[in-house]
Amino acid sequence: MRVFIMFDLPVETKAQIRTYNKFRKRLIQDGFLMMQYSIYIKSCLNKDAAQQTVNKVKRYLPKDGHVRSLVITEKQFENMMILVGDEDKNIELLGDNRTIEF
């Protein structure tokens, strides 16, 4: 399973920038890799682990902005097409059904 966290947070004030950075760093601490700007992805063993991951993110959501999650299967992830650009090195690490366990 793959968990996507997609967010759009305001960064107009110093406090908002701090909130943005804090949220982003927390995602990385929880094992997410940046797929694209404001799109982070994590590989999970199964549906329950994916749901636990989403629930964990819910505990440190910022107050403002938009944050979405999406859980997809490995097969759906493998069918994702890159329309422009190359595969990111971070995503290559998680490619073809590999799971990083912490």
Image: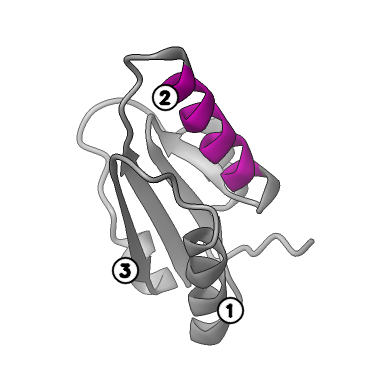
Instruction: State which mark lies toward you, 2 or 1.
Output: 2
Q: Position of residue 44 (x, y in %)?
A: 58, 70
Badge 1 amino acid: Ala
Disc marking residue 16: 2
Residue 92 located left or right of residue 68: right
Q: Are marks 1 and 3 in contact (CB under 8 Å)?
A: no
Q: How many residues crowd mark 2 within 10 Å: few (<14), some (14–19), many (20+)?
A: some
N-terminal of the pair, mark 2 or mark 3, is: 2
Image quarter hosting the C terminus: bottom right
Q: Position of residue 36 (x, y in %)?
A: 39, 33
Residue 100 located left or right of residue 38: right
For mark 1, give the secondary structure: helix
Residue holding disc 1: 49
For mark 2, give the secondary structure: helix
Badge 3 amino acid: Gln
Quarter of the view holding residue 99: bottom right
Q: Which residues are magenta?
A: 15-28
Residue 84 located left or right of residue 64: left
